[in-house]
Image (cartoon, rainbow, N blue to C red):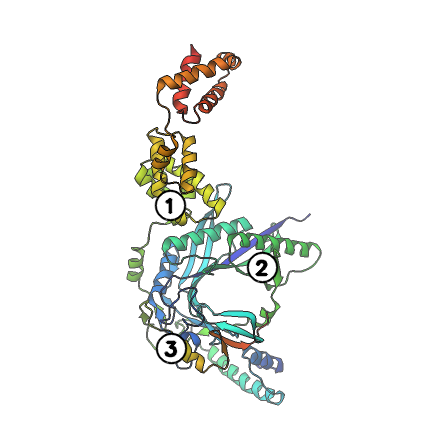
């Protein structure tokens, strides 16, 4: 049986979060009535001239700096020619030769904790096309040009990825990065972040790449994984049956979980790029690049290192907490008001992330604010409640029953600190379980856990496990 | 380099131009002579010359990121052949 190696490169289109379009002063807001944000430039009416948006250039520079890339001192725009009704000019303004960003790199972290560097070949600026609505409009196609001219940064990776898992890790890393930088909202439902995957397979050990297919317009992390896995299987089956992979564009159908050929695009692949005579070369000085560098926020890698050194977090926890800027900010807000970094990390990664995942809620929309989570953590650290009771308090807060102190008060969840009361419980548990007492005294340390559990049960969870542990040891040791 | 009939047909197709059969030899001749002229220029050593991206010796001015256009859909759609629900209608595109 032949062993196959998968080779993947990704092209990610990320919509830049500007107020106005890349070459016109029309707004870019999502969801406006059809064609209400398409001006004469976007419509490609005769006699109009594109003028480049300064912010778009600055955002591309930010991205380039964040991936340690080269920022081109001189960059040009080109026309990519093809005919489609949602592209009114008959060409898309893009970059071909001399893109604004070249040769960057990014580290991804894999399941087993190892790191891998993925090369970024280039990132170039271009305008988005409009939208075609194929529902029946009197037997015709409807065209909405609101999206036409929306600024995109197309980020092209090297064919450095070897599995769908690596591709997803890379895509997530780029997604987090553009959001950290504030250059894109990364909203996948609205199409602000989408990806094409170039996929091929080759016998392991072979130097040359196999023939690739291009999977178009994948707009979720889950789909990119499924689309690549399907495509790899398809290509291997084809090759093992003596067939050949043909270079083509394929569309991933999420409903059927399969890819299929888009033959219509085949012969239009000759885009006849040439420099756009309507636009002059863009020049970027090193002074300008440095002034942009000064505005860069703390990036995920630096933040992760700081979380480890300042808060004493474990590396894997710091990675999870810095995966998105929102989560990192939430965590830091909890630490600031509770003063308990490790407890904050455990609660954000454990309980909070669990609840958010289960109900598919973004951390920014969490019903438990950072202040509320800090409230329950403070009550754990001052011994008002145990960690176990805290979970009940958390659940009640999640269900909108108020803040931690209110819930603890109303439900009478305060920890029992009265030594006399606890002693009575401990004595009873010891008296009720003579067999286990023997085992413990015979050296079976593990039985202590059983006693603590019984005592906690007897207090209705309101005992302090550490205190009970100590009392049990004192009494059983006698 | 000289172009044949199939080259001309391909170029016409990419440009979405309808051309008639009888004109093809003439187009092939004209386009071929343009390519010959380019080939003559290829003979010049340009290794030390920065490729020209634009005939004007100037740099692209940039505009501030501000919305300056208002919605003029009614006026634009008044001259469109067919519209409905705010959409421009075009002959059906089949994917």
Q: Are marks 2 and 1 on the same chain?
A: yes
Q: Nearer the viewer, residue A477 or B86?
A: B86
Residue in view at x 31 percent, y 68 percent: B64
Give coordinates of residue A163: x percent, y percent.
Answer: 55, 50
Q: Quadrant of the C terminus of chain A?
A: top left
Cα distance between the residues tagged 3 and 1: 43 Å
- Residue denoted by label 2: A252
Residue positioned 42% across, 20% down in the render: A469
Q: CA distance from mark 3 to mark 2?
A: 37 Å
SS type, badge 2: strand
Which label belongs to residue A49?
Answer: 3
First in sequence: mark 2 vs mark 1? 2
| Mark 2 vs mark 1, CA separation in Å | 33 Å
Q: Nearer the viewer, residue A156 or A385?
A: A385
Secondary structure, mark 3, is loop
Q: Is residue A319 visible?
A: no
Give neighbour class at mark 3: few <14, some 14-19, many 20+ (Cα, 10 Å): some
Q: Residue at x 69, y 59 (%)?
A: A243
């Amino acid at each position: 049986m032949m062993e196959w190696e998968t080779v993947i490169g990704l092209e990610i289109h990320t919509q830049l979060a500007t107020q106005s379009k890349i070459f016109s002063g029309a707004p870019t807001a999502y969801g406006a009535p059809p064609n209400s944000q398409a001006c004469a430039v976007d419509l490609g009416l005769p006699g109009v001239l594109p003028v480049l948006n300064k912010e778009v250039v600055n955002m591309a520079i930010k991205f380039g700096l964040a991936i340690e890339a080269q920022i081109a001192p001189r960059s040009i725009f080109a026309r990519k020619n093809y005919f489609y009704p949602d592209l009114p000019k008959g060409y898309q303004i893009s970059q071909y030769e001399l893109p604004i960003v070249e040769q960057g790199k990014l580290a991804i972290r894999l399941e087993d904790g190892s790191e891998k560097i993925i090369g970024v070949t280039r990132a170039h600026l271009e305008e988005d096309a409009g939208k075609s609505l194929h529902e029946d409009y009197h037997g015709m196609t409807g065209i909405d040009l609101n999206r036409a001219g929306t600024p995109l940064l197309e980020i092209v990776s090297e064919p450095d990825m070897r599995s769908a898992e690596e591709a997803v890790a890379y895509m997530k890393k780029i997604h987090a990065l553009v959001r950290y930088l504030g250059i894109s909202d990364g909203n996948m439902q609205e199409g602000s972040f989408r990806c094409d995957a170039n996929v091929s397979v080759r016998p392991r050990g072979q130097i040359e790449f196999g023939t690739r297919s291009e999977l178009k317009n994948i707009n979720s992390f889950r789909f990119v994984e499924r689309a690549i896995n399907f495509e790899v299987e398809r290509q291997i089956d084809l090759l093992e049956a003596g067939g050949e992979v043909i270079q083509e564009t394929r569309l991933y159908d999420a409903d059927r979980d399969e890819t299929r050929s888009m033959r219509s695009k085949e012969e239009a692949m000759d885009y006849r790029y040439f420099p756009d005579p309507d636009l002059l070369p863009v020049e970027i000085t090193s002074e300008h690049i440095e002034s942009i560098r000064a505005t860069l926020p703390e990036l995920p890698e630096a933040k992760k290192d700081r979380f480890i050194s300042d808060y004493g977090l474990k590396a894997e926890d710091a990675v999870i907490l810095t995966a998105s800027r929102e989560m990192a900010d939430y965590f830091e807000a909890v630490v600031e008001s509770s003063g308990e970094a490790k407890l904050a990390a455990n609660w954000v990664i454990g309980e909070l992330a669990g609840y958010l995942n289960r109900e598919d809620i973004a951390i920014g929309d969490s019903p438990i604010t950072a202040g509320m989570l800090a409230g329950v953590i403070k009550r754990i650290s001052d011994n008002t409640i145990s960690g176990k009771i805290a979970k009940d308090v958390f659940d009640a807060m999640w269900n909108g029953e108020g803040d931690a102190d209110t819930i603890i008060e109303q439900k009478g969840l305060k920890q029992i600190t009265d030594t006399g009361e606890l002693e009575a419980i401990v004595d009873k548990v010891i008296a009720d379980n003579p067999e286990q007492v023997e085992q413990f005294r015979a050296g079976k340390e593990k039985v202590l856990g059983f006693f603590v559990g019984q005592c906690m049960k007897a207090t209705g969870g309101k005992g302090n496990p550490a205190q009970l542990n100590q009392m049990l040891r004192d009494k059983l040791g006698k | 380099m000289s172009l044949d009939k199939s080259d001309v047909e391909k170029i016409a197709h990419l440009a979405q131009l309808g051309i008639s059969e009888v004109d093809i030899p003439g187009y092939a001749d004209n386009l071929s002579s343009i390519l010959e002229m380019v080939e003559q220029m290829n003979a010049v050593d340009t290794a030390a010359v920065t490729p020209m991206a634009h005939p004007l010796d100037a740099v692209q001015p940039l505009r501030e990121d501000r919305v300056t256009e208002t919605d003029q859909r009614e006026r634009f759609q008044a001259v469109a052949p067919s519209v409905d629900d705010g959409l421009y209608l075009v002959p059906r595109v089949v994917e």
